[in-house]
Every structure is written in C-alpha cells, then in structure tokens.
Image: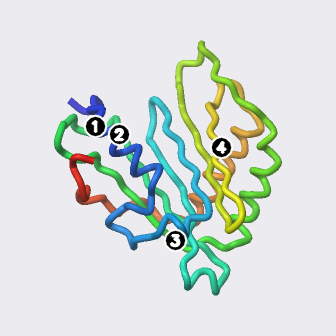
C-alpha cells in the first residue's frame, strides 16, 4: 500500500524540505549560513529543495555548498511512527552560478501569481534569499500555462542539479519523532 502517507509524515517531510540544513546524514550546516533556498512541493510528484550555504571555508574561496533534499510521497509506506524516507546530495557550487540564478530571479519578481481554481496540481514553490542586509522570502503557486517565473524555476533546477551527484544519502532517522 504505497503512496498513502500520513499527515505526520507530510509534516515532517515538509519541515525537512524547508530546513535542509537539518538533514542528518550530510555535514551539518547552520541556517545562518544559508544564502539561498528554493523548494517546491507539488501535489503529485517528488518534493524537493535546493539550498546554498557558505561556511568559513567557502567564504574564503567564494564558493557555496549546494544541497538538494528530496522526498517521494508516492513511494512511502504509511506510518504514524516511522519517519519519511528522504534522500540528499551535496556539492560545491561556484559563486558565479548562484549569482546567475539570483540575477534571473531579480528579473522575475515583479510578476504576481494567483492560483487558478481549476488547475488540478496545487503545487507550492518558495524562494528565499538572504544576505547580511536583506532577506527575501517569495511564495508562488505555478499555474497551468508557462510563465517567465516558471521558466526561471525550470532553468534554475536544471542548473543546480547539474552540479549535484545522484542523491544517495538516506536520512536514517529523525531526532525527534514527536516533532
């Protein structure tokens, strides 16, 4: 009986997607070091997030740690106690690539999205960008017809995924099952 997950599993998976620095099987990252976060939670597909962190070492080199976390609700066994099974990967991302992603985002932000009540996939997307002086968190709901923001989203995901190996690290358990 795959694909019917509990609300508790969804809640925990969403928390992990929105807070990828908490993924235990990869090196621990601090939320304060997170410069970029993009996540999408589609109704009928894999939940994913991409984040960029700068620690002491990457600040010196001008690079970022790029992390992708994914959860596939359609392959999950329903459980009220077992945590959802998530996978992740991490790699170095050159600063020029993240700068290109952010430049593309700055062009798209004037658009405003309103959900189409007839659209059958109520996906949710969030982009978060932080610097020492600024913090932007932008939510939108993609609509059925392609838009420049959706094109940016697709191009950004392809760009970031090109730097990451296959996701092979499984999250073994959760620190707190009660959550």
For marks 4 and 1, the one nearer the N-term is 1
Which numbered disc, 1 or 3, marks the residue closer to the eye? 1
Q: Front-most of 22 and 158?
A: 22
Q: Secondary structure at mark 1?
A: helix
Which numbered disc, 4 or 3, marks the residue closer to the eye? 4
Q: CA distance from mark 4 to mark 1?
A: 25 Å
Estimate the x, y position of residue 153 in percent, counting from the top left. Answer: 66, 45
Q: How many callouts does the rendering have?
A: 4
Decide: few, some or many residues near mark 4? Use Cα within 10 Å; few <14, some 14-19, many ≥20: few
Image color mode: rainbow
- According to the image, label 4 marks what residue? 138
- If the image is split into quadrants, where does the N terminus sit? top left
For marks 4 and 3, the one nearer the N-term is 3
Q: Secondary structure at mark 2?
A: helix
Q: Residue furthest front?
A: 133
- According to the image, label 1 marks what residue? 8
Residue at the image point whose x is 25% and y is 33% from the top? 2
Q: Is residue 36 above or below residue 80?
A: below
Residue 156 shown left or right of residue 87 in the figure: right
Q: Front-most of 60 and 131?
A: 131
Decide: few, some or many residues near mark 2? Use Cα within 10 Å; few <14, some 14-19, many ≥20: few
Which numbered disc, 3 or 2, marks the residue closer to the eye? 2
Cβ atoms under marks 4 and 1 closer than 8 Å: no
Residue 178 shown left or right of residue 60 in the figure: left
Estimate the x, y position of residue 136 in percent, counting from the top left. Answer: 67, 51
- According to the image, label 3 marks what residue? 91
Q: Is residue 34 above or below residue 71?
A: below
For marks 4 and 2, the one nearer the N-term is 2
Q: Is residue 29 above or below residue 77?
A: below
Cβ atoms under marks 2 and 1 closer than 8 Å: yes
């Amino acid at each position: 009986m795959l694909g019917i997950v509990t609300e508790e599993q969804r809640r925990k998976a969403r928390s992990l997607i929105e807070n990828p620095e908490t993924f235990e099987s990869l090196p621990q990252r601090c939320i304060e070091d997170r410069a970029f976060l993009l996540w999408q939670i589609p109704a009928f597909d894999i939940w994913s997030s991409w984040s960029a962190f700068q620690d002491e070492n990457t600040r010196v080199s001008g690079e970022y740690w790029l992390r992708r976390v994914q959860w596939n609700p359609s392959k999950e066994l329903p459980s009220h106690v077992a945590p959802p099974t998530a996978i992740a990967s991490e790699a170095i991302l050159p600063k020029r690539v993240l700068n290109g992603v952010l430049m593309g985002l700055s062009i798209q932000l004037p658009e405003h999205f309103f959900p189409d009540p007839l659209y059958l996939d109520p996906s949710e997307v969030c982009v978060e960008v932080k610097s020492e002086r600024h913090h932007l968190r932008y939510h939108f709901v993609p609509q059925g017809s392609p838009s420049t923001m959706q094109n940016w989203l697709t191009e950004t995901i392809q760009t970031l995924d090109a730097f990451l190996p296959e996701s092979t690290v499984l999250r073994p358990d959760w620190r707190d099952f009660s959550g």
